[in-house]
Image (cartoon, rainbow, N blue to C red):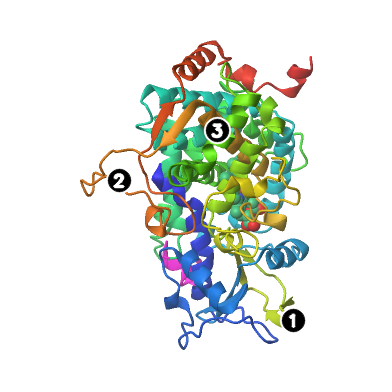
Amino acid sequence: MATSLSFTEAAALAIVLMVGIHALRARSSSEGRRPPGPRGFPILGNLLQIPGQHPATYFRKLFEEYGGLVSLNVAGFPIILVGNMTLAKELLEKRSAKFSSRQATPYSRCYDPDQNHWPVHSGKSHFIGRKLSASIMTGVRAGETEPLQQFEALISATRILDDRGSSWFHEVERTAASMVLTAGFGFHCPTGDEPELKELLACIADIIVLSSPNGSIINALPFLDKIPGIPKPWRVPADAFRRREEAVYGKLVTRAVSGEAAGMNTWAALFASEDKPEGDQRRLMNPFATAAIETTASSLQAFVLACILHPQWIARAQAQIDTIVGPDRIPTFQDRARLPWIEAVVRETHRWRPALRFGLPHKSTADDIVEYQGQEYYIPKGSIVLAVTMAIEHDQNNYENPDEFHPERFLDDKGQLKGGYETSAFGFGRRLCSGLPFAERSLWINIAMMLWAFNIHKSEERDSRTGLPFEYSSGDEAFFGGVTNAPLPFPAVFQPRTAHHEEVIREEWANCEKDLNVLLQHKTEIDK
Ligand code: HEM
């Protein structure tokens, strides 16, 4: 599933690099002092200085040199980097009205003419997508998806037990996909080899290619697509993608609305309900899969990496689980309020390796002035603003030893969660992650389950590439290189904490409710 790890990556890079192509078009009428930044080259500006791999590491170096607000110029087009929480909130939350647009590629008009992939668009589809997500997430907040998420975490633990973790990396990806696809469409993926899942992941891989800045000549020469009577070969892959996407999501939505999953309380059914003023918006479900799978899987993988590289805290977290949950049952969401340690581990996972290294780019729609360290800086309309999560969450002024994994930093002397928690991991303002309540529940139950059931440690397995023992690292070399913090696959040993823990998982699995119609019941049925 590694290919699916890059939709957000492609979307973000597309937005960043597209600005170069459209340089000079959107120049602002008035000028002022821009935030500091590295000197660029004539015409290209800083374009060649931004590395294609691990740009966030380069951005962090810029913050060290210039402070928390940095300006880059990509072929004449402004990019503003924000590496400071206060500033990010000032711009992207308080001034959300001006800083919440996006920049889609011109080619997107060919492969996504209805703007169904609303997270990379602004306007009507985004407005409706967010409105519908808000109603879905009200249900998630009320606990509607918790039985499903608990069930998926139990499947995951069972499967990890079965092969002693030899395919844990893939299993985490399966769990992330199955949680969102079941909640979304009633499409459960118990093996990860389901043909529709593969097709859907192939569509995600397709859109990565199509949405990249060099996805088509149309991005550089948009007028070509408007000339009547000339051959338009770029439309062939765009049309093929639309047909493919339509077919796979069409099947999933039909299944949710009138087929096998029609009795379940799925998000697609809600999106499709005709009695809403927005009418039938079922296609606005499509981006949920792309936004959810990669982010959730890579966060859980980063958690496992943290267990291996920074294990000092694990005994204390497990001691709390043992006191509250005990050895005779698995943890459930009902334990959540009494397990601050798990909450702290979830927070530290988002902080240590936020799923998106610099969120998704926001675009400004008006000129603005921002004050930073006693100086006023001008941010022209049309700037691309990146809140660099990897810098904000590793700011030494807020976090001691920021590159280490210390969940205790979120706990007070009495072991309770400290107040005033804020994170940049889910973005900001009007673009704040629409799936946040679902995402944090997914992380919580899977992390609680893994810590309850297993001792996780490094594997003695040899690296097939070098023939030497596997070298664990949390450096850039251990991660895919772009916008996401998706770790490259690595082995891990999942040893059941005791034979009794293993037995309990097996028993819980044998006895648990497996009917998705019950797990995803309509609220009215629960109320009866
Ligand atoms: C660990 C898990 C996740 C993380 C860290 C994460 C993070 C993010 C971030 C940083 C953004 C961009 C925010 C911005 O532009 O300011 C975003 C957007 C989005 N996320 Fe998530 N996400 C996660 C899981 C999910 C899940 C599970 C779903 C759906 C169920 C989801 C749906 C979305 C959508 C639809 C958007 C676009 C929002 C918009 O443009 O208005 N995400 N997410």
User: Looking at the picture, does residue 239 appear above or below residue 46?
Assistant: above
Q: Quadrant of the C terminus?
A: top right
Q: Nearer the viewer, residue 438 or 451?
A: 451
Q: Sort mark 2 into few (<14), some (14-19) or many (20+) by Cα contacts within 10 Å.
A: some
Q: Earlier in the sequence, mark 1 or mark 3?
A: 1
Q: Nearer the viewer, residue 162 or 342?
A: 342
Which residue position holds label 1? Answer: 374
Give the left or right position of residue 54, taking residue 108 as reference: left
User: How far apart are the alpha carbons under marks 1 and 3?
Assistant: 45 Å
At 70% across and 38% down in the image, what residue appears?
Answer: 137
Give the left or right position of residue 299, taking residue 268 as reference: left
- Confirm or reject: label 1 Cβ below 8 Å from ligand 1: no
Q: Position of residue 477 (x, y in %)?
A: 37, 57
User: Looking at the picture, does residue 130 appear above or below residue 458?
Assistant: below
Q: Which circle, 2 or 3, is nearer the viewer?
A: 2
Q: Position of residue 42 (x, y in %)?
A: 46, 88
Which residue position holds label 3? Answer: 446
At 64% across and 39% down in the image, what residue appears?
Answer: 343
User: Looking at the picture, does residue 337 appear above or below residue 87?
Assistant: above
Q: Position of residue 53 (x, y in %)?
A: 40, 64
Which residue position holds label 2? Answer: 470
Residue 215 falls inside the magenta stretch: yes
User: How far apart are the alpha carbons under marks 2 and 1?
Assistant: 49 Å
Q: Tell me the SS state at disc 2.
A: loop
Residue 28 falls inside the magenta stretch: no
Q: Tell me the SS state at disc 3.
A: helix
Give the left or right position of residue 474, taking residue 365 as reference: left
Q: Sort mark 3 into few (<14), some (14-19) or many (20+) by Cα contacts within 10 Å.
A: many
